[in-house]
Image: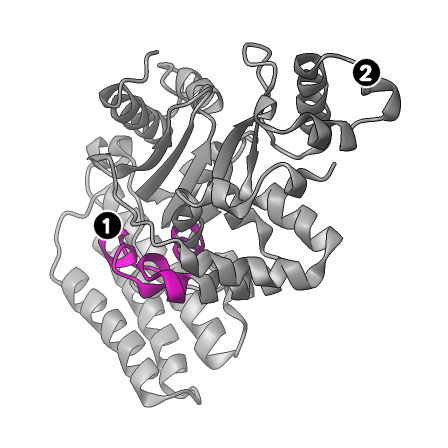
Amino acid sequence: MKVQEIFSLEDFKQTIPFTALGARTCYSSGDLNYLLNDPRVVSKEDRAKFLSKLGNYKHFSVFAHAFAYKDLLSLTEEKINSLLDENLRTLKKTKKAEILALKIAATSFKSHYNPKYPTVIGISLRHYLERVLEENEEEYFKTFEKMADYDVPVEPLGTEKNVTLIGLIKEYDGYAVFFIDDVSRTMTHQLVRHTALNYSQRSQRYVNEDQNKLIIPPSVKETDFGGIPEDIKKNYLQIIYEYSKLITSSEVKDSLKDNVLGRIEEFIQSYRKRKNLTLEDIFILTDELAEAVYDVAVYRGKVKREDARFILPHGRKTTIVVSGTISWIKDFIIKRTDPHAQWEIRDVAIQMKNLLEKQGIDF
């Protein structure tokens, strides 16, 4: 189905910046304020160049954060006829528009159709670009140049704790884009099971994990562990120190080496002074030990970060951009605000619900 003959780049112009935000989230350790000042997100020229680079790599997933609806009755009857089989062309225009909408929904990945609006179809910029590439590679790359024509700012609509509503379409079944920070990968493993939504997550392949932190569950913080023997703490710190010595003799830039060794030394000194350690401290010590192994693998073993990350805990902090139609966002919220949902994903779902309600979205 040639959706590029139904939609145009102009249809997506209000949401194109969300694709750049999603992509930069993958490659950056910065917070939302940092990203909203990144030229590749806010400058139309730099954004177009950045997205063109992603397009060259066929990194289509980030373009799902841009979305548009179209009532196919807005097309000329001639255009509708050209997209349908000849035996359907004698039908009334409304019926033909309904058939065309269903045909697109049946053949386009994550498109959105609702019988309540039978002549309306929603697709992402991803669909559009994939179809343009199939038809004409030269036109595909020109499309990214055209993106520089759209100077649309990213203006967040509200924040609740660590969740920000970045963008919202209210027409038909709507579309929402969220930026979620300061959550664990354990939580995002649960989140991405909601496969109707779209995701762009901070990458451990490309983003340095040095000085990233561990998310500690409240139940761990609240546990009365009765204290940890001093010898256990000393053993942890000694092993971490021994790993740091391996990094000292590694053949990497002194600036990189000094940063890692400085962080490890600061950690060891801070924990040497601590008394009456808790279960939370055991979690933190274990995370620091895992990071020391990660550092040895990267700086001494010359192992790629994408392989060294296998040693890192799932509880490490991450950032993720989530988007989807309001109907599928609601499906996620209903399921994950249930009392049986785990605390972290439930907190995020509650925040998302609160943000949407403030924008007049009913539940």
- Please state the extent of the stretch shown in magenta in the rendering: 21-47
Residue occupying the point 28% across, 82% down:
258
Q: Earlier in the sequence, mark 1 or mark 2?
A: 2
Residue 271, how many percent across, how many down? 18, 60
Amino acid under disc 2: Thr
Residue occupying the point 47% across, 80% down:
300
Circle 1 residue: 229
Please determine whether, in this image, residue 169 is positioned above or below residue 339: below
Locate the C terminus and report the quarter of the image it occupies.
top left
Residue 113, how many percent across, how many down? 59, 21
Label 2 crowd (10 A; few <14 / some 14-19 / many >=20) = few
Q: Is residue 35 magenta?
A: yes
Question: Residue 199, can we see it?
Answer: no
Of all residues, the one furthest to the right in this rendering is: 87
**Disc 1/disc 2 C-alpha distance (Å):** 84 Å
Q: Nearer the viewer, residue 209 or 73?
A: 73
Circle 2 residue: 90
Label 1 crowd (10 A; few <14 / some 14-19 / many >=20) = few
Residue occupying the point 55% across, 10% down:
116
Q: Secondary structure at mark 2?
A: loop
Residue 178, how many percent across, how many down? 35, 37
Q: Is residue 125 left or right of residue 288?
A: right
